[in-house]
Amino acid sequence: MPDPLRSNTRSTSTESMSRHILSLLNDADSALRENLHRHDLDPTARDHMERALNHVREAYIATNEIGKARSVQRLVGDLEKVESLLTKVRHRESPSVVTFKVRV
């Protein structure tokens, strides 16, 4: 028969570890966001930090809400879709402005 005290100790230990992991993930999120505010950041470093920030946030969900996080492959696929859409929007030509003469 399982010992309820031992089971409770394991649960408390798991919760404590989860809180510690969530705290570290919050620290990582804060550090990445702080770095992303820098204007002198190398573009490649910025790209890596933006991707890392998304992974850190998804790891937070995976730790805090078991079963609700996307797989790494799904997250990467979603990020690539967003990047592709943003690239299309940035490169889309703006509609030409049509001016009309107004007689007064």
Image: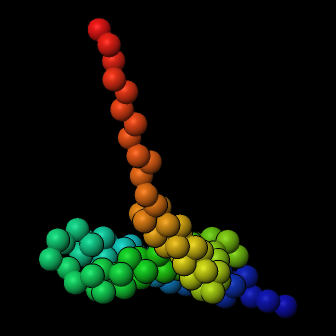
Q: In x, y percent, where is residue 83? A: 49, 73
Q: Quadrant of the C terminus?
A: top left
Using residue 76 as the reference point, say whether residue 29 is left or right of it.
left
> Which residue is at the front of the view, 75 or 63?
75
Residue 91 located left or right of residue 33: right
Whole-percent x, y for residue 89 in the image = 47, 61
Residue 99 seen anywhere in this rendered image of the structure: yes
Which residue ends up furthest to the top in the rendered image? 104
> Residue 100 is drawn in which quadrant?
top left
Residue 39 versus residue 17 in the image, above or below = above
Q: Quadrant of residue 74?
A: bottom right
Q: Is 33 displayed left or right of 16 in the figure?
A: left
Tally the numbered discs.
0
Q: Residue at x 74, y 88 (%)?
A: 3
Vertical relation: 69 (above or below) 14 = above
Quarter of the view holding residue 37: bottom left
- The residue drawn where x is 32% and y is 13% is 103
Q: How is the image coloured?
A: rainbow
The extreme bottom residue here reads: 1
Which percent across, then down, holds residue 92? 46, 61
Residue 63 can be seen, yes or no: no
| Spot occupied by residue 43 in the image (x, y as percentages of width and height) | 27, 82
The one of 29 and 2 positioned closer to us in this rendering: 29
Q: Which of 75 and 13 lies nearest the eye of the viewer?
A: 75
Quick one: 50 or 2, which is closer to the camera?
Answer: 50
